[in-house]
Amino acid sequence: GAGVSQSPSNKVTEKGKDVELRCDPISGHTALYWYRQSLGQGLEFLIYFQGNSAPDKSGLPSDRFSAERTGGSVSTLTIQRTQQEDSAVYLCASSLAVTGELFFGEGSRLTVL
Amino acid sequence: AQKVTQAQTEISVVEKEDVTLDCVYETRDTTYYLFWYKQPPSGELVFLIRRNSFDEQNEISGRYSWNFQKSTSSFNFTITASQVVDSAVYFCALLGDDKIIFGKGTRLHILP
């Protein structure tokens, strides 16, 4: 498709399990962002990629969170040993350039039981 | 450090009224960009506008207008003659040192 694609759209997991969330940005977009949105809350910055490198990882909440991007395209956000407070919608966005508008995916809703 | 403050958590107005959503930002960068996004009940964020720090001209797009004032570090958004379809959460965002940060959003209810 032409937009940002995220999978899975919904994930229910048990506390302590690892999860992987995938983001497929718009083709040609060099910048890719991950945000987290808890119920009724704003967007919390997690990490940003320019190409395959992540100049800013300052938003990752703990060392249980990691992200990578390969081939300047697909990105994976991994959460190890999930906790209930990790429950949120994880949003991915991409842009043609750092200063450009962000195009958002529909998000991956994570529920940790 | 960068910061975006949207002091209005929730606003309700009757249809056809005008409404202004406030956004105040903090940054030490001299070059930066400001954005507004809309998140309707369906959930997917939609880009509304981008403004760079060197362009203080106000902008109008249909019923939407934006007032950028560097002197007060504000980038306010006005909806004229509001409609029920304008009901959504609106986010102001700032791009300074290569990352875009968002305010906490203002939830707007347009009552019929």
Image (cartoon, grey):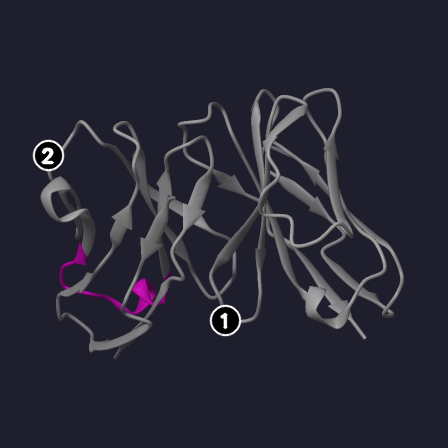
**CA separation, marks 1 and 2?**
33 Å
Note whether residue A76 is visible. Answer: no
Chain under callout 2: B
Q: Which residues are magenta?
A: B78-89
- Left or right, A14 with reference to A108: right
The three-letter code of the residue at mark 2 reads: Gln
In this rendering, is residue A83 above or below B95? below
In this rendering, is residue A39 above or below A32? below
Label pair 1/2, CB-CB below 8 angstroms = no
Residue drawn at the location 35% of the way across and 42% of the way down: B94
What number is the disc on residue B57? 2
- Left or right, A42 with reference to A64: left
Q: Position of residue B61 (x, y in %)?
A: 19, 43
- State the residue in front, B25 or A13: B25
Residue drawn at the location 17% of the way across and 52% of the way down: B63
To which quarter of the image does residue A27 belong? top right
